[in-house]
Amino acid sequence: MRSGGINMTDITLMTSCAAPAKVLPSLTLLSHRVRVLPMEPSSILKMPENTILLVDAREDLSLAKSLCSIVRASNLTMSVILILTEGGFTVVNASWGVSDVMLTTASPAEVEGRLRLASQRGGSAESTSKEHAVDSGSVEINSSGQMCSGDLVVDTQSYTVSLHGKPIDLAYKEFELLKYFVQHPRRVFTRAHLLQEVWGYDYYGGTRTVDVHIRRLRAKLGVEYEHVIGTVRNVGYRFDPLESQDEVVDSADSDNNDSSAASD
């Protein structure tokens, strides 16, 4: 989309500043769509995949680094740009996994140029969404509607799951939950999001239900494969295809309390 001959880029600014315009003043002079979200892990799930993420690292470098790590762990392809003071440049390095850095005092011309380059590197929204819909390198879908990740096969036609060719007995919601995960490999979902997508808007139970079903799924997958459903601390869960178990973030469930059975 263009406005006045200038490309309009979708931008997300994560900041704790009460006056977001002060984070990068030059941005207010440019014709771009900017949404402002709090510096919280859950904000990552509220952003479109074609956005350019600006992270306010002027004051809390530790929090900014943590958020960048979560974006990288979520396998999102969006460009991430840190907004820094001059002192911040002494701390940031390649391990942060960011695309670029900018001083909070950057000129409008510099901001526009860096956003343009980030947009070109980030790829189109269409290609990004396709990548997240089905990761062909890790989950295959055949003509029979079977989703295969290594020896794990989820059959969406017969509502059955097998591992190493042996059937796994799953309750209906357990199957729906596993199916949703496999359909979105490496994507991180909050408990609230999973509750909405798997149980529906009319379900009035709490997010504790999700934890119970996750534990049941892990138990039925067995010790060898329970880690494919990983826990991302302070955010939620994600499915790591069997070929990529080394990338699992904190696969052990942080909540070890016994829970009562949840109804399907």
Image: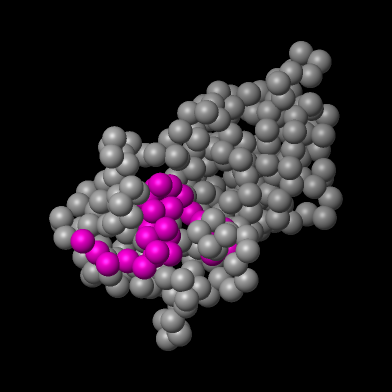
Q: Position of residue 260 (x, y in %)?
A: 45, 85
> Which of the pair 101/45 is nearer the observer?
45
Q: Is residue 83 above or below residue 67?
A: above
Q: Evaluate whether residue 81 shows in this view.
A: no
Place residue 214 in its image quadrant: bottom left
State the image quarter where residue 103 is shown: top right
Which residue: 15% across, 55% down? 165
> What's the residue at 22%, 49% (across, down)?
150
Structure colour scheme: one colour
Answer with the quarter of the image where residue 61 lies. Answer: bottom right
Foreground pick, 103 / 116? 116
Residue under the image location 48 percent in, 28 percent down: 127
Residue 121 falls left or right of residue 218: right
Q: Count the marks.
A: 0
Q: The magenta stretch spans which residues?
A: 167-194
Residue closer to the observer: 28 or 140: 140
The reply to whether residue 126 is visible in this rendering is yes
Horizontally, residue 73 falls left or right of residue 110, namely left
- Residue 106 higher or lower than 13, as above or below: above
The residue that appears at 46% across and 50% down in the rendered structure is: 187
For the N terminus, the quadrant is top right
Q: Is residue 117 left or right of residue 181?
A: right
Does 191 appear in magenta?
yes
247, 168: nearer the viewer: 168
In percent of width and height, residue 257 lies at 44, 85
77 up-or-down from 160: above or below: above
In the rendered view, tell whether residue 225 sits above or below residue 76: below
Q: Residue 2, percent across and down?
A: 74, 18
Position of residue 213 measured from the top left corner of the image (x, y, whole percent): 42, 70
* Magenta stretch holds residue 255: no
Q: Residue furthest left?
A: 165
